[in-house]
Amino acid sequence: MTTQAGPRAAAEAADGQRIVPGPRGVPLLGNMPEFGKDPLAFFERLRERGDFVSWRFGPSPALFIAHPDTIGELLTEIERTFDQPDLGIAFRTLLGNGVVVAKGADWRRKRSLVQPSVRPKQVRSYAATMAECAVALADRWSDGQRVDVKKEMAALTQLIAVRTIFGVDTAADAELIGRAMDVAQKEIGAEFSGIGAILPDWVPTPGRARIKKAAAVIDAEVGRVVARHRDGDTERPDLLSRLLAAQDETGAHLSDEEIRDETVTLYIGGHETTSSTLVWAWHLLSRNPRVRAALAEELDRVLGDREPGFEDYAQLTYTQAVVKETLRLYPTIWLLTGIAQEGAVLGGRPVPPGTRVWSSQWATHRDARWFGDPDEFRPERWGTAVPALSGEDGAADGESAGGKGAEEIPEYAWFPFGGGPRVCLGTRFAMVESVLVLAVLARRFHLDLDPGEIRPVPSLTLQPDRDVLATVRARPGRPAGEDADPGADGSGTAATAG
């Protein structure tokens, strides 16, 4: 493992806890112009200055932290000595007051109602749908075909999300919601890193108008599906039916508005994040033939001539490592932030109340102190037994609890799903979906992406800056259109409409 050197060593005090100043800002806007121009590069520059760096988000004081121990303190203290910040009107317009946005007792109530819908037993029941949708896509691909990987993965994960969350299976549902989500996430990214981040909510902007229009489409579609569920059988195995049936400790159900907020939140977790992860995985595999060959070897050895089911997830350890390494290099959630309350402490240092503290998965995941050759795509760094997901309630199926890979990777040096009490509820869903979809498609095909640089654009998730075009290459002995029986190993029934 490499050691720190250069500007960082010169900037830090002996105990590594000294707050160092960030780049000089401008009046009123602080460091907003530099942050807005390229947030990822900005956070990397802050990381090079030290583990505690002061800067200004507009006129407000801000603190950037980069060390895994301190990041862990921040994440575990959210809802105690750090508060969940207001992420802006664009974010609230899309997510309402769902579990990602809610605070305090309201957050605890909603989390207790939503969490049972994504526990391991429930995710297991969705696995067959994930595989079936991927098989249907594989059956449409052919050797030599040209595809837009970004559009293909978006359409696939939209269909999986619509089936598993809403229990419907029509192209219109997926297309309408998907188009609106695309608009919404772009506008959230633009608002968050631009001047809109410090404008009052009442100031109208074209971007805010666009996201309001997109949210209206989503509201109408979700409302229509909710009404259909209320009039029919609520025992169907989709997420929406489970949310409608959930009751808190007083026996109260989620309201229609709360149902809308939580289904949109789950849709983003099940579609946007997984779609982005799969696109970046294909990009990295295309640029790394050695890794691609190792992945194919595992898929042939574990699966042979059959499609994967949930029971195979535990055995696909290298496929899991490919997903984890993709999430290290291209984390879909690329920053986290909290507001210091009275009594907040980080690294033994009091943090003044009102200070906005920032951490960036992008910057910490690429820190050479924790990852040797940090820019290299090397799934082997995770070992064959993939460590448990940070902050989850126990190890995920097929993952060793607290295991160590080939590198000594500290907890919270890898945190693509956050951590602490507010760890992403969809973590297990996203991991299982990514692994099974990749297994279905990579067992039959390689994707040769067109040459040229693809840059990440930070919006609601981390998206490619252009179309991702590729040529489909059938693997020898794995022709497209072969018969498949996903879930034949008893992995559960598909969560489709009854």
Image: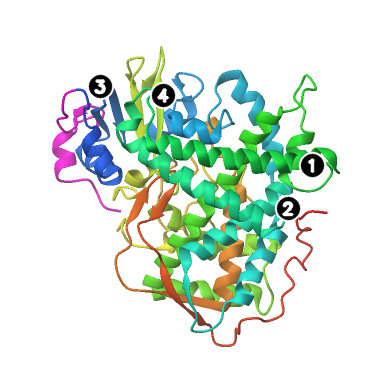
Q: Position of residue 227 (x, y in %)?
A: 76, 38
**Colour option used:** rainbow
Q: Which mark is residue 229?
A: 1
Q: Any magenta on residue 483?
A: no
What are the residue bounds of the magenta stretch?
1-27
Q: Any magenta on residue 24?
A: yes
- Residue position for label 3: 59
Q: Which mark is residue 168?
A: 2
Quadrant of res 127: bottom right
User: Nearer the observer, disc 4 or disc 3?
Assistant: 4
User: Nearer the observer, disc 2 or disc 4?
Assistant: 4
- Residue position for label 4: 201
Q: Secondary structure at mark 1?
A: helix
Query: How much space separates mark 3 and mark 2, taking CA atoms?
Result: 47 Å
Query: How much space separates mark 2 and mark 1, taking CA atoms?
Result: 10 Å
Query: How much space separates mark 2 and mark 4, taking CA atoms?
Result: 35 Å
Q: Earlier in the sequence, mark 2 or mark 4?
A: 2
Q: Nearer the viewer, residue 117 or 60?
A: 60
Q: Main secondary structure of the magenta part?
A: loop
Instruction: Decide if residue 207 is on the left or right side of residue 299.
Output: left
Mark 1: few/some/many CA within 10 Å (<14, 14-19, 20+): some
Q: Residue at x 32, y 57 (%)?
A: 455
Amino acid type of the residue that numbered disc 3 sits on in the rendered structure: Pro
Q: Secondary structure at mark 4?
A: loop
Q: Position of residue 235 (x, y in %)?
A: 84, 43
